[in-house]
Image (cartoon, helix red, strand yellow):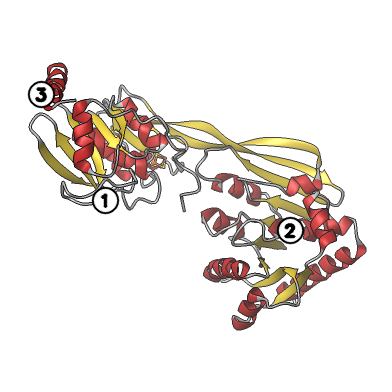
Amino acid sequence: MKIAVLSGKGGAGKTLVAVNMAAASKNAVYIDCDVEEPNGHLFFKPEGLYTQNVVVKTPELNPSKCNGCRKCIDFCRFNALAYIGEKIKVFDEVCHSCGGCILLCPQKAMLERDRVIGRIETGISHNVKVITGILNTGEASGVPIIRRMLDSISEEDTFIIDCPPGSACVVMESIKDADFCILVAESTIFGAHNLAMVYELVGLFDKPFAAVLNKYTDDDNPSELFCSKKHIPVLAKIPFDKELGELNSNAIIAVREKREYKLLFEELLAKVYQEVRP
Amino acid sequence: MGLIEAMSVVKIYKGRIEEMKIAIPVEDKAMESRVCISFGRTPFFLIYDTETNSSVFLENSAAGSQGGAGIKAAQIIVDSGANAIITPRCGENAAAVLKAANIKLYKTVNDIIADNIKAFNEGTLSLLNEIHAGFHGGHL
Ligand code: SF4
Ligand code: SF4
């Protein structure tokens, strides 16, 4: 079972929910796809880490073969190539490694070379296997790292996928194979706005999903209103609670600390299982 | 600086470099239009020839690019044969293209085209030093 946890903006409680869900299950694999700013590992403090580099294929010019026809430049829709002083310059960080220019060059002047764009760290934290994707700063796209992490997924375990915030292609890559999506939203107008954003995104994928409302109070709740309007089931309401906030800001996993949170997240997990396999 | 002196500065320039073409990102295809605040996303580039005082407006086909707009826009400048660009801002990738092509980067004095050309001719423009980080989260 693969459960993707997402939110429109960072700071809505996405990592809180993902980390605690993983900690509340018997055995889980937590995958941090927020590769630009992974912070799940700060909570889990995984041990026995091992690291793999993630490489992508990047073009490199063999200047003696290039005749300056510029076909490669016109082709590259990411504008990663420029022609200056009778040479092609490749902007590595802008290149998306589609390989197109290498295939297309009539002179076979583009060679392929491996380039490290980031790494994957894997470790253990009690009942949770923690997999963290880390994109090197300045790199354009974390998609290759996310793809590599999710390729290693098997069917049996519970996988909690902590998605990047927003709705860019890294998010789509992260939820592509998920069985269920959890949209985390704060209980404010901004929260509702961000919720609407991810709501549209999961709609594109035709996946079962539900919401979790964070910092829940009895006051007016624009996010809850949005859910009832759109008939989005709300699977959990995480109370606005000072203690939880403190645990969270000290990177402590609430589920491992307090029984009431253990129950809350166990119940959330049970409900997700209900939704997927009734 | 008096007019005669200013003209002699231009002459020195002319003596040194036969043809001087400067590029400026502009809002519209007219000399009365304003300098555009964005380099990569500007709708047009003015290519001004200080030798002949002639101006050509090039459409910036990079303006609608999803990513790498700066690189593509810089390519347009390189291909135009300009020797210098006067712009309020420039991203690091675009600057890399321009510098590799030996195109000098100057900072605009204000958003009025004529003022910037005048300042260029008088040699009072300063080089553009702050180059902003080019590619952060802008892609889809
Ligand atoms: S397509 Fe090949 S030959 Fe043509 S400019 Fe690009 S690298 Fe050079
Ligand atoms: S591999 Fe694709 S993205 Fe990279 S430079 Fe070539 S065409 Fe552009």
Q: In which quarter of the image is residue A135?
A: top right
| Quarter of the render that holds ligand 1 | top left
Give the quarter of the image for residue B72: top left
* Residue at 33 percent of width and 46 percent of height: B37
Name the residue nearer the viewer: A155 or A92.
A92
Q: In this view, does B7 lie to the left or right of B96?
A: left
Q: Is the C terminus of chain A in the top left, top right, bottom left or bottom right quadrant?
A: bottom right
Of badges 2 and 1, the one in the foreground is 1
Q: Please give the residue where the numbered disc 2 appears in the rendered image.
A: A18
The residue that disc 3 covers is: B4
Q: Which amino acid does label 3 sit on?
A: Ile
- Residue A182 percent coordinates (x, y): 68, 67
Please determine whether, in this image, residue A277 is positioned above or below residue A33.
below
Could you tell me which chain the residue with mark 2 belongs to? A
Does residue A55 sit above or below B35 in this rendering? above
| Marker disc for residue B43 | 1
Which quadrant is home to the N terminus of chain A? bottom right
Using a 10 Å C-alpha cutoff, classify the residue at mark 2 as few (fewer than 14 neighbours), some (14 to 19) or many (20 or more): many
In the image, what residue occupies the spot 83% across and 71% down?
A267
Q: In what element is the residue under mark 3?
A: helix
The relative height of residue B34 versus residue B8 in the rendered view (above or below) is: below
